[in-house]
Image (tube, rainbow, N blue to C red):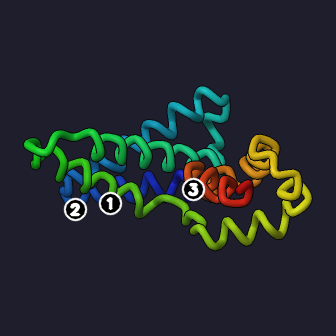
């Protein structure tokens, strides 16, 4: 996702007077700007950085949904709306079968060792931002059994 696309989506939400959608996108835009400043690429923000920040924000909102008390239904609905808006802009994640096939095709020599730490050390950099770490961990655990 390009940063400009995210900004234009925020502007479109402003013009449509959709405050909830604008707020959700705006929080992602400001998180991207902050990350860009921290990494020293303020003027030319790479799409990889934008994707990484979107995934981080998505995970944060999911944690808010999971920890929200049941009696706070309106707050939980707000979090779920933010999650749905942010997930529209998130990069596609690999599913379990794609991860399993990728690991078998590219890391067969490391899998043969049966050492989970060594497998994770090799696999995680290759799949960073493309798949959920917990899912990768569970699949690697299956290979080590």
Between marks 3 and 1, how big is the CA–CA gap? 21 Å
State the image quarter where residue 105 is shown: bottom right
Q: Quadrant of the C terminus?
A: bottom right
The quarter holding residue 16 reads: bottom left
Q: In which quarter of the image is the N terminus?
A: bottom right
**Circle 3 crowding by C-alpha within 10 Å: few under 14, some 14–19, many from 20:** some
Element on which disc 3 rests: helix
Could you say where residue 22 lies in the image, as x and y percent from the top left? 28, 51
Q: Disc 2 vs disc 3: which is toward the camera?
A: 3
Tell me if mark 1 has few (under 14), some (14-19) or many (20+) residues whose alpha carbon lies within 10 angstroms of its own. some
CB within 8 Å, label 3 to label 1: no
- Binning the other alpha carbons within 10 Å of mark 2 as few (below 14), some (14 to 19) or many (20 upward) gives few
Which residue shows up at 59% across the image and 49% down it?
133
Lateral position of residue 113 relative to residue 88, left or right: right
Q: Where is residue 74 in the image (x, y as percent from the top left)?
A: 10, 48
Q: Which of marks 2 and 1 is nearer the N terminus?
A: 2
Q: Is mark 1 on a helix, strand or loop?
A: helix
**Residue assigned mark 1:** 84
Work out whether 103 lies above or below 115: below
Q: Which numbered disc covers residue 135? A: 3
Question: Mark 3 or mark 1, which is nearer to you?
Answer: 3
The image shows a total of numbered marks equal to 3
Residue 51 visible (yes or no) = no
Question: In the image, which disc is placed on residue 16?
Answer: 2
Whole-angstrom CA distance, mark 2 to mark 1, is: 18 Å
**Does 74 sit above or below residue 87?**
above
């Amino acid at each position: 996702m390009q940063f400009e696309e995210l900004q234009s989506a925020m502007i479109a939400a402003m013009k449509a007077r959709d405050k909830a959608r604008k707020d959700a996108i705006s929080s992602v835009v400001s998180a991207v700007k902050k990350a860009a400043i921290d990494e020293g690429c303020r003027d030319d923000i790479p799409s990889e950085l934008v994707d990484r920040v979107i995934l981080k924000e998505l995970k944060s909102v999911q944690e808010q949904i999971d920890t929200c008390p049941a009696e706070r239904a309106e707050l939980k609905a707000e979090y779920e709306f933010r999650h749905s808006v942010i997930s529209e802009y998130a990069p596609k994640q690999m599913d379990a079968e794609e991860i399993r096939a990728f690991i078998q095709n590219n890391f067969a020599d490391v899998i043969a060792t049966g050492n989970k730490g060594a497998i994770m050390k090799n696999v995680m950099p290759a799949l960073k931002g493309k798949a959920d770490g917990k899912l990768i961990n569970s699949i690697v655990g299956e290979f080590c059994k």
